[in-house]
Image (tube, helix red, strand yellow):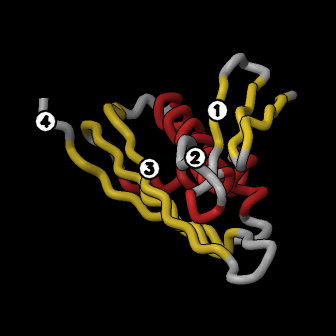
Amino acid sequence: MKAEIDWGGNVQFAAHTESGHTIIMDGAPSHGGMNQGSRPMELLLVGMGGCTGFDVVGILKKARADLRSLKIQLEAERADETPAVFTKIHVHFILTGTGLKEPQVDRAIALSAEKYCSASIMLGQTADITHSFEIVEAQD
């Protein structure tokens, strides 16, 4: 995997990914930025959320679960001292479908957290990561 980052002045950077996408990162005005992009640590957090979402959807689809939508809410705490690594991350899944079973959803989340999601496993080296979920029955 490769990426290239160009400095845009002040504390703004444009990341160009190997897959051909560009992500703008910028700081808050209080840190010399213009608030024109996400913070790098926000990208780490949402990257982890996307990684686990990819896994959970794939596992449930493979099990032929009728998953219609998935929302992932993330909340993180960081250390007060430098480096201000993540110390706690809570991941809450809201799954909408028909006939989704709690044990099946719980297993999909556990497999992602413990085996498949590289981002979760890596961030879990510094952060206590917890998970919760709720199932919403789809209204056809």
Residue most extreme to the bottom: 80
**Label 4 with label 2: CB-CB less than 8 Å:** no
| Disc number lying in front (2 or 3) | 2
Residue 98 located left or right of residue 58: left
Callout 4 secondary element: loop
The answer to which of 17 and 9 lies nearer the viewer is: 9
Residue that mark 3 sits on: 72
When the figure is inspected, residue 66 is found, relative to residue 27, above or below; the finding is above
Mark 1 or mark 3: whose residue is earlier in sequence: 1
Between the residue at mark 4 and the residue at mark 3, the CA separation in whole angstroms equals 20 Å
Residue 86 or residue 13, whichever sits in front: 13
Question: Which is more N-terminal, label 4 or label 1?
Answer: 1
Farthest residue in the left direction?
A: 140
The amino acid type found where label 3 is placed reads: Ile
The location of residue 135, given as percent across then percent down, is: 30, 52
- Foreground label between 1 and 3: 1
Crowd tier of the residue under label 1, counting other residues whose Cα lies within 10 Å: few below 14, some 14–19, many 20 or above: some
Q: Amino acid at mark 4?
A: Gln
Circle 3 crowding by C-alpha within 10 Å: few under 14, some 14–19, many from 20: some
- The picture places residue 27, in percent across and down from the top left corner, at 62, 53
Q: CA distance from mark 1 to mark 4?
A: 36 Å
Residue at (80, 32) in percent of width and height: 6
Q: Are the residues flagged by discs 2 and 3 in contact, CB closer than 8 Å?
A: no
Q: Secondary structure at mark 2?
A: loop
How far apart are the two marked residues, 1 and 2, measured between alpha carbons?
8 Å
User: Where is mark 2, residue-wise?
Assistant: 38
Q: CA distance from mark 4 to mark 2?
A: 35 Å
Residue under label 4: 139
